[in-house]
């Protein structure tokens, strides 16, 4: 498999948003930026993401053959067996690394990150296997990102605080609106728009955080402005606007994480999340985010 094909299959341009999810999960669990497990978690959960993207192409090969024949599998650049093998292999390696995070560092969190990783792997597999014509697929995708938060949190703390669960639910709402939009991408138009109302939840949560932590105001304003921009693209519905809105909302995950991190006093990680947002936009110009 050529490197360029692997990068396209893995949608690696979106990886910085996975890293900010890890930052958020670790920070909300009370761990410091210097925690030795942070790099391990970044690698592990990046493998879960890339493996999931590989499986997405493998399971969607018949759809892509009709609608997106330029994708690596239908265009003959790689075999479906290779993609399945690499996809499931990366999920397995990611799970092993979560096990090491739980059992290899004190204080030991033991089985907890492994359990979260197993749930994440199941959710990733189920989404990729049954997301076409599944009205609940946005919910399943949101659960996948929630579990990134929780896997990171449980890797550093035996008991995740309530703030981690609240933030995970907020992220779930954002992903429901995002994934619904992504399901319309190949149509280049938007059907019923009511699921986009879920995007109000993270805005409301960000406002609440900003009332207590003024440092959250800047990332919150950036997040609101960027979300409005993406929704404007959906309303305009010109050629290419829906795909552009999709990748914009994906990049917005890093902005949401920045709001949450700043709102909980993790200013350094909040700043890194803003850098990750810019990096995502830059990488999306090089490798397609969808």
Image (cartoon, rainbow, N blue to C red):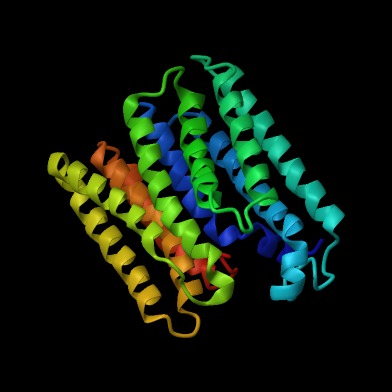
Res 64 quadrant in image:
bottom right
Where 239 falls versus 287 (above or below)? below
Q: Residue furthest bottom?
A: 239
Where is residue 180 drawn, in percent x and y?
A: 48, 59
Tell me residue 27's x, y (percent).
37, 33
Vertical arrangement, residue 107 with respect to residue 188, above or below: above
Residue at horizontal 76 percent and vertical 56 percent from the top: 58
Quadrant placement of the C terminus: bottom right
Q: Is residue 153 left or right of residue 257?
A: right
- The answer to whether one can see residue 68 in this image is no
Quarter containing the N terminus? bottom right
Which residue shows up at 61% across the image and 58% down it?
Answer: 133
- The answer to which of 260 and 108 lies nearer the viewer is 260
In the image, taking residue 252 as reference, residue 140 lies left or right, namely right
Instruction: Write the residue at 51% across / 36% down.
Output: 147
User: Residue 185 lies in what quarter of the image?
Assistant: bottom right
Q: Is residue 240 above or below residue 213?
A: below
Residue 150 at what x, y percent from top left?
47, 32
How many discs appear?
A: 0
Q: Which residue occupies 45% across, 78% down?
A: 241
Mark yes or no: residue 154 visible: yes
Return the x and y of residue 256 as percentages of the image width and height.
Answer: 34, 51
Q: Eyeballing the image, is 85 above or below 165?
A: below
């Amino acid at each position: 498999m050529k490197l360029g094909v692997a990068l396209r299959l893995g949608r690696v341009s979106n990886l910085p948003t996975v890293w900010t999810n890890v930052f958020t999960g670790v920070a909300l669990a009370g761990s410091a930026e210097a925690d030795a497990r942070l790099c391990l978690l970044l690698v592990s959960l990046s493998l879960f993401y890339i493996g999931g993207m590989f499986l997405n192409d493998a399971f969607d090969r018949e759809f892509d053959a009709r609608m997106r024949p330029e994708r690596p599998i239908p265009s003959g650049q790689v075999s479906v067996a290779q993609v399945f093998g690499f996809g499931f292999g990366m999920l397995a390696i990611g799970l092993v690394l979560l096990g090491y995070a739980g059992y290899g560092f004190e204080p030991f969190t033991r089985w907890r990150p492994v359990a979260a990783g197993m749930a994440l792997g199941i959710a990733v597999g189920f989404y990729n296997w049954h997301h076409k014509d599944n009205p609940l697929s946005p919910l399943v995708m949101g659960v996948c990102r929630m579990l990134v938060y929780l896997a990171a949190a449980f890797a550093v703390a035996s008991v995740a605080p309530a703030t981690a669960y609240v933030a995970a639910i907020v992220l779930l709402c954002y992903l429901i609106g995002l994934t619904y939009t992504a399901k319309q991408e190949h149509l280049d138009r938007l059907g019923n728009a009511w699921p986009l109302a879920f995007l109000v939840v993270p805005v409301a949560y960000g406002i609440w955080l900003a009332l207590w932590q003024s440092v959250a105001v800047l990332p919150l304003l950036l997040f609101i402005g960027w979300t409005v921009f993406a929704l404007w693209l959906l309303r305009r519905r010109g050629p290419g606007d829906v795909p552009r809105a999709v990748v914009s909302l994906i990049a917005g995950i890093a902005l949401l994480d920045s709001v949450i991190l700043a709102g909980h006093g993790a200013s350094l990680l909040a700043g890194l999340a803003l850098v990750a947002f810019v990096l995502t936009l830059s990488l999306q110009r090089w490798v397609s985010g969808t």
